[in-house]
Image (cartoon, grey):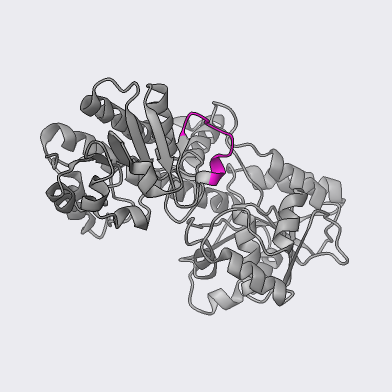
Amino acid sequence: MCVVGLGYLGATHALAMAKLGHEVVGIDIDSTKVESMNAGKISFHEPGLEVALREALSEKLVRFQTSFEMTEPAEVVFICVGTPQTGSGGSADMSFVFAAGETLSKAVSPETVVVGKSTVPVGTAAALRNRMSKVAGFPIHLAWNPEFLREGTALEDSLKPDRIVIGSWDDYSSHKLKDVYKPILDEGTPLVEVDVPTAELVKVAANAFLATKVSFINAMAEIAEVTGADAVELAKAIGYDERIGNEFLRNGIGFGGGCLPKDIRAFVARAEELGAGEAVSFLKDVDAINRRRRARVVTLAAQELGELKNKKVLMLGLSFKPDSDDMRDSPALDIALQLDQAGAQVTVHDPVALGELGDKHPALIREQILSAAAKGQDLVILGTEWSEYRALDPTAFGKLVANKLIIDGRNVLDVAAWQAAGWRLIALGRNVHN
């Protein structure tokens, strides 16, 4: 099989397929990325993925190339290219999907099954199939098989998913995909077979629901902050209701990354194109609530420190979540930049993501050693809940800073322990300030 696109999704999927015993050719137009992966190196941080790459290379189950040319046509080709947000309108950029499809059309056979895994607006698959069939000169077998990866556990999510969704126009394509996933299906993983438009909707609908859940509890946190209630205990109480559950029901500075923010905006844009914008207009509020929680931290910093100009602030974490170096739409990075714009001297620390900053945002002070980063700070903000931040000794850490003031943006610190060590701890949505 082939996997087209070797970004986060494509690299992970290629190696998951190799883990299942399939022979995989990974294709990407970026020659640097291809050379790196052939040498056993991954260009991003994801636990376990580089080990899996080296194992697959040693077993000769995977290879990577820039060309779409094959010695023989692949049985199955997965399209895993990016669908980034376009400009300020929020719609998804489908140019990479269509470009990959049209190039593939010249390399596949009538028996090849092309499978979309990229997150796309509903209706994309039909347009893609028409374009590919015109270029190929024969009807293309196209199916849609959405991904449900979580950064930090992506390989495990691929090999032990909570469900496999297949959308297709013909039995041939669905049978081929069931063969691909047979080892996983034989372990009892639920299979959901649907029409193609439903398969396209599954991922964006799931992300919209999860984003709504996060923003709901953050909206409750806003109420808690003006009433003296505790949003963390509130989430615990309602989470016991099996109809609600406690997953994604944790208030703080909100969600980020390359999926949830982008996907809900693209969902709204596509619904408006279809004339059904009112059906998902609430997602605009979901997005707005999420952004407000970031602004709330800046407001709290100003309330505590007064004039922010020249105040020293340490941001603990830059990635949008722990066990990842992904800073796309990261709440932590966004807050750091807002503080910088307000005149604060912002130092940033992250276990793995610092290098991803590169030359961007030069005003942010990079510090790789945590103890050095803490020295002389007026305010510490926990922006990403890395385990090493959760495990900090508040007494020892307090000896390094100039002012024992911390904003826990993720509600993961032991409030009593930090307060006992002399810290003024502000936890979003909680009346625990001392």
Asked if 52 appears above or below 321 in the picture, the reply is: below
Asked if 47 appears above or below 5 in the picture, the reply is: below
Residue 258 in the image, given as x and y percentages of width and height: 52, 44
* Left or right of 302, for residue 126: right
* Left or right of 17, for residue 154: left
- Can residue 402 be found in the magenta stretch? no
Q: Which residue is located at x 56 percent, y 54 percent? A: 199
Residue 374 visible from this viewpoint: yes
Residue 405 in the image, given as x and y percentages of width and height: 22, 38
Asked if 375 appears above or below 413 in the picture, the reply is: above
Pick the quarter of the image with the C terminus: top left
- How many numbered marks does the figure carry? 0
Q: Which residue is located at x 64 percent, y 52 percent? A: 7
* Left or right of 66, for residue 238: left
Magenta residues, start to end: 355-364
Residue 192 visible from this viewpoint: no
User: Which of the 4 quarters of the picture holds residue 14?
Assistant: bottom right
Please tell me which residue lies in front, 184 or 329: 329
Please tell me which residue lies in front, 409 or 120: 409
Magenta span main SS: loop
Pick the quarter of the image with the N terminus: bottom right
Residue 359 in the image, given as x and y percentages of width and height: 59, 35
Residue 75 in the image, given as x and y percentages of width and height: 77, 67
User: Which of the 4 quarters of the picture holds residue 241?
Assistant: bottom left
Asked if 20 appears above or below 247 in the picture, the reply is: below
Q: Which residue is located at x 40 percent, y 39 percent? A: 332
Q: Which residue is located at x 43 percent, y 36 percent? A: 280
